[in-house]
């Protein structure tokens, strides 16, 4: 359906463990703990990829990048988003991502100083101007200090 508008939603969470890098939105975050994950554990980009897939009910990234496959160990999540975008266009034809709204929940470290850099990285991956990428940082108020979580909603126009 030309000109159809679709909304996608994705969510991801990982436990934080010592000795792993913390990557959020394609940006390395200085931290003593990082995501316990098969790939680089970038919760924001994982949620973003799932949101893109959900615009056309195409499943989730676990289907494309199974954690049981050693080929994806340590995978840079920017590659996940690029592959999902290509797969989405192969399936649906030309699409235009209109905007992204993301929430990242992490008690520590604080991410505010990295907001513009993370938004710019996400915008670049999606071919958007940075002002169309809204990123909110929250804490769990001490309810889940040993995890990082992200939720993403986005809009897509199918050309």
Image (spheres, rainbow, N blue to C red):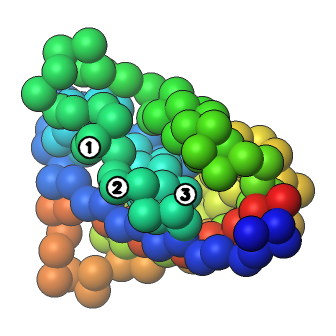
- Count of numbered badges drawn on the protein: 3
Q: Which residue is label 3 attached to?
A: 52
Vertical relation: 95 (above or below) 23: below
Q: Nearer the viewer, residue 131 or 93?
A: 93
Please tell me which residue lies in front, 106 or 127: 127
Secondary structure, mark 1, is: helix
The secondary structure type at the circle numbered 3 is: helix
Q: Residues within 10 Å of mark 1 (few under 14, many from 20)?
A: few
**What residue is shown at x 60% (from left), y 76% (from top)?**
7
Taking 53 as reference, is 126 above or below it?
Answer: above
Q: Residue extending furthest front?
A: 1
Quadrant for the C terminus in the image: bottom right
| Residue located at (43% from left, 79% from top) | 138
Residue 118 seen: yes
Of tags 1 and 2, the one toward the viewer is 2
Q: Earlier in the sequence, mark 3 or mark 2?
A: 3
Quick check: marks 1 and 2 in contact, CB under 8 Å? Answer: yes
> Rounded to the nearest whole Å, what is the CA distance between mark 1 and mark 2?
8 Å
Looking at the image, the residue that sits furthest to the top is 71
Q: Position of residue 72 (x, y in %)?
A: 29, 21
Disc number at residue 59? 2
Comparing 7 with 1, the one in front is 1
Residue 116, disc? none
Q: Where is mark 1, residue-wise?
A: 62
Residue 17: name its quadrant.
Answer: top left
Figure check: 116 above or below 153? above
Of label 1 and label 3, which has the lower sequence position? 3
Image quadrant assignment for residue 52 = bottom right
For the point 65% across and 60% down, which residue is it? 115
Q: Is residue 150 above or below residue 6?
A: above
Q: Residues within 10 Å of mark 3 (few under 14, many from 20)?
A: many
């Amino acid at each position: 359906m030309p000109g159809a508008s679709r909304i996608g939603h994705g969510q991801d969470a990982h436990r934080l463990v010592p000795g792993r890098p913390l990557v959020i939105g394609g940006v390395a975050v200085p931290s003593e703990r990082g995501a316990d994950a098969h790939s680089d554990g970038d919760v924001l980009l994982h949620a973003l990829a799932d949101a893109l897939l959900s615009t056309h009910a195409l499943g989730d990234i676990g289907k494309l990048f199974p954690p049981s496959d050693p080929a994806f160990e340590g995978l840079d999540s920017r590659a996940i988003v690029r592959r999902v975008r290509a797969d989405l266009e192969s399936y649906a034809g030309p699409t235009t991502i209109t905007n992204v709204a993301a929430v990242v929940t992490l008690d520590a470290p604080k991410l505010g100083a990295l907001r513009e850099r993370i938004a710019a990285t996400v915008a670049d991956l999606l071919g958007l101007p940075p002002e169309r990428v809204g990123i909110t940082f929250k804490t769990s108020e001490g309810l889940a200090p040993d995890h990082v979580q992200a939720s993403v909603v986005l809009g897509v126009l199918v050309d």
